[in-house]
Amino acid sequence: MAKTVIIGAGFSGHFAALVLQDALKKKGDHEITLVNLHPKFTYIPSLVWVGIGQIPVEKTQFELQPVCDKLGINLVLGKLTEVHPDDNHVIVEVNDKPTQLDYDYLIIATGPKLDFEATPGLGPEKGFTHSICTPPHATDTAQQYLALVDRLEKGERAKIVVGTGHGMCTCQGAAFEYISLLHNNLKDRGLRDRAEMLWLSNEPRPGDFGIDGFEMKMGPVTFTSEDMATALFEDFDIKVEVGSHIHKIEERTIYTENKAGEYKEFEFDYAMLIPRFTGQPFKYLDKNGNDIKDKMCNPAGFVKVDANYGKSYPELTAQDWPKTYQSPVYENVFACGIAFAPPGCISEPCTTPTGTQLIPAIPRTGYTSELTGGAAALNISEMIEGRAPCHTASLAETPGMCVASLKNSWLSGSAATIGLQPIVRNKAAFPEYGRAVDHSAMEVGLAGAWMKKALHYAFLYKLQAKPFWKVIP
Ligand SMILES: Cc1cc2nc3c(=O)[nH]c(=O)nc-3n(C[C@H](O)[C@H](O)[C@H](O)COP(=O)(O)OP(=O)(O)OC[C@H]3O[C@@H](n4cnc5c(N)ncnc54)[C@H](O)[C@@H]3O)c2cc1C
C-alpha cells in the first residue's frame, strides 16, 4: 500500500487528490491524505466579485469533508510546518499539536504566501490598502468599498488606485478585473464622475499580465493585448502608470519608482494592490535536522522541480520549463500550482538605474494549477506501479485561458476572454512570436460574462467530484 500526502487543497492540490484517487481506485489499497489550513475549498477567481460586494463569499466555497468522505480521501485540517524528506514524513500542526504524517509520495501544493511585508504600508492588516486575495480580505474589502460608495453618494470625491504592490508581483489579471468591475459598478451607481482612477502596475506595458502580453492575428492585422488593455483603460477613463515598483505606502500616499528611475507619489483614498507572492514559510529538514531549504527551494521559497534553473532571461528556452513537477532532489516529492519554482519569468525583467528590480512574475492561473496538479498526481500513480513519471504539463506546451470579468451581469455584463497557445513563448515550435498567434483569442463582450459565470459553476461542480466531473475540462 502506498501513502500519498498532498499539502494544500486549492486548485492544484485538491485537483491532484481527485485525479490520484481516480487513477488508483482500481489498483489496490492505497491511501491519500489531503492536508489543508481551512475546511472549505475557495474558488479564488470569484473573489473579485466578493470584493465589490456583488456576491457573498459563501457562494465561492464548498466543504471539503463531504467530498473527501465520498472519495475515501483522508482530510487533515492543519498547518504544515516541517518537511522531512530523508525520513518521508511531514509535521502538521493539528489543533496546535504537532502531528507526524508518514508518506511514500508527497505533493506540495500550498499556493503563495501573500508577502505584504515586502512593501511597508501594504495590505489590510498592517497597512493602508485592501486585498481580494483571500476570503476574509475580499469580504473586508467589500465593506470598505461600500463605505466609499456611501461617501461618494454624500458628494465626496475619491482617488482610487488598483494594481500591484511590488515590483516582483504577479496576478495583474485579478487587479485588472477588479479595477474594471469598480469602474462599471460606480458607473451603474451614477458615481463614476466623483472618482479618479489609476492603474498602477509593475508590468512593462499595459496588457502584459506577466506573460509578456500576447498577440492575435486576424487576416493581415495583428492585435496585441496592449491594444486591448489601452483601449479599455481609455474607454473607462482610467489613468495608467506601469513599470512601477512601490517602495512604501503611507495613510494617503503611495511612493513609487519607475523603470526610468523616477520617484513619484500618488495620493489615494481607496486602494487595492496585490502583494508579492513567495513560497509558504515551512521548514525543510534533513535526517540530522539540518535546514535544507536552499537545496529544495529557490530564494523566494518556491519548490524546485524538473526545470533548468539558473539561466538568465535571454538564455531561457521552452525546454527549460518543468514538465513532470518532480523534485530533482527527492524523487518522491512533487510540487504544483503556485508552489513550484518557475525557472524564470516570461515578461522581460528590468532593473532601474538605482538597482530596483521590476520582475513581473509568471501568473499560475487556476487552469495551469490544475494541469500541473494533475500531472504530479498521474506521475505518482505511475511510480506506485513501478514506472517512471511520464505525464507532462509544460507551460511552454499547454494553452492559457483566462476570462477577465469587467462587469458581472447576465444582461449587461462584459468580460475579456483570452486564449493563447502556449503560455510560455516557445520559439522552437513557433519561430515568429513563440505562440500560435493564428489561434489566439481576444474578445470583449457579454458572451465572456456568461462564460465567466459558467466557469464559476463548472469549477465548483467539478471539484466536488459530482457525476461526470471528469468530462469538464
Ligand atoms: C483575486 C484573485 C483572482 C484570481 N482570478 C483568477 C481567474 O480569474 N482565473 C484563473 O485561472 N486564476 C485566477 N487566479 C489565480 C488562481 O486563484 C490561482 O492560480 C490558484 O488559486 C492557485 O492554486 P494553488 O492550488 O497553487 O494555490 P491556492 O489556491 O492558494 O491553494 C493553496 C492551498 O494550500 C493551503 N495551505 C497553504 N499553506 C499551508 C500549510 N502550511 N499547511 C496546510 N495547508 C496550507 C491553503 O489553505 C490553500 O487551500 C486568481 C487569484 C487571485 C488571488
Image: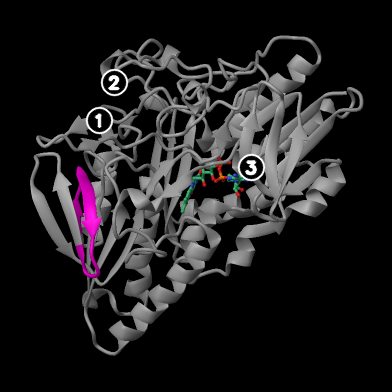
Along the horizontal axis of the image, is 154 left or right of 407?
left
Q: Is mark 2 on a helix, strand or loop?
A: helix
Q: Position of residue 460 (x, y in %)?
A: 67, 52
Give whichever of discs 2 and 3 has the lower sequence position. Answer: 3
Q: Where is residue 95 in the image (x, y as percent from the top left)?
A: 72, 56
Q: What is the crowding at mark 1: few (fewer than 14 residues within 10 Å), some, or many (at least 20)? A: many
Question: Type of residue at label 3?
Answer: Leu
Along the horizontal axis of the image, is 46 left or right of 153?
right
**Is the Cβ of the residue at disc 2 closer than 8 Å to that at disc 1?**
yes
Residue at position x 57%, y 22% from top? 325
The residue identified by callout 3 is: 80
Q: Residues in magenta?
A: 239-253
**Is the Cβ of the residue at disc 1 closer than 8 Å to that at disc 3?**
no
The residue identified by callout 1 is: 349
Q: Where is residue 363 in the image (x, y as percent from the top left)?
A: 42, 38
Is the residue indicated by label 3 positioned so its CB lies within 8 Å of ligand 1? yes
Quarter holding the C terminus? top right
Give whichever of discs 2 and 1 has the lower sequence position. Answer: 2
The residue identified by callout 2 is: 313
Residue 24 lies in what quarter of the image? top right
Q: In this view, does 279 lie above or below 314?
A: below
Please give the count of numbered marks on the rendered protein. Answer: 3
Q: What element carries label 3?
A: strand
